[in-house]
Amino acid sequence: MTDMRNNGDAKLMVCEAAATVALTRKGKLTNLPTIKPEHDFSPLTMQENLKAPSSNYGRHLAKQEDPLDIYVAVNELVYCLRAESRDFMRSLYWIAWMLKFASVYKKTNKQPLVCSYRPNSFIDQSYGRDVIWLIWEIVVDASRTSPQAGVLLPYIDSLFKLHCLRWNPSVLKNRLCFLICACQFICESNTLDVSYPVPQNSGIVKGITNNIPQWLRSIIETQRTFSS
């Protein structure tokens, strides 16, 4: 690891990646909505929020050991991500609903909500029954069956792997940005601009990386003036 950290080519790659990200177009990512169990878990509220015309949309993804309590949310999420509906905000609602249900279940029963095991070579297999992998299976399936699958799949695959990196339940909240972004890509895939070059001008990135040594010297000199 030390050899990698001190390798000039590795340093340059990190600097180029940072400069490229800094120069890309940016937008504010939507947060998951707040779920209030006493309201959102009530049968009346759930009935009002149902949009799927059939209860069969999620059947091909539900497995034997998945809790029946969350099947309605699963079915609605699958429907929200289908090409004929593509409702981004409602997809976030049902994701938040399932995560909140799992949280309340754990507090009430003193044990986590257990779903069917879903193989995942990118995580510790002891975490393979977490509800988040059922949600990701829905999202990945939606990208594969989308008319824009050819465009979507590489992005969704990368976001999924980023979410899985050194995963454990304590990092879930900080990793939700990848899941939200994946849903947004699917729901907005008709207008997704993949022709936009990143960066638009490679010369600007080169100029930034060439100036980094000078900036570092200036920072060090400034620090020395404070300590003298």
Image (cartoon, helix red, strand yellow):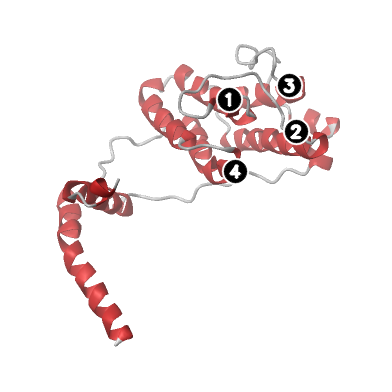
Query: Identity of the amino acid at label 1?
Result: Gly
Indicate the position of residue 202 as horizontal and vertical percent values: 17, 48
Q: Residue at x 80, y 40 (%)?
A: 37
Indicate the position of residue 100 as horizontal and vertical percent values: 71, 38
Q: Is residue 39 left or right of residue 216?
A: right
Residue ID for mark 2: 111
Q: Nearer the viewer, mark 3 or mark 2?
A: 2
In what element is the residue under mark 3?
loop
Indicate the position of residue 218 as horizontal and vertical percent values: 22, 74
Is residue 199 visible in this depiction of the protein? Answer: no
Sequence-wise first label, 2 or 1: 2
Q: Which mark is residue 170?
A: 4
Q: Which mark is residue 160?
A: none
Residue ID for mark 1: 128
Query: Identity of the amino acid at label 2?
Result: Gln
Q: CA distance from mark 4 to mark 3?
A: 22 Å
- Say if mark 3 contacts mark 2, CB within 8 Å: no
Q: Residue at x 41, y 21 (%)?
A: 149
Sequence-wise first label, 4 or 2: 2
Q: Which mark is residue 67?
A: 3
Q: CA distance from mark 4 to mark 2?
A: 15 Å
Please, is residue 204 above or below residue 134 in the view? below
In what element is the residue under mark 4?
helix
Sequence-wise first label, 4 or 3: 3
Q: CA distance from mark 3 to mark 1?
A: 15 Å
Sequence-wise first label, 3 or 1: 3
Query: Identity of the amino acid at label 4?
Result: Ser
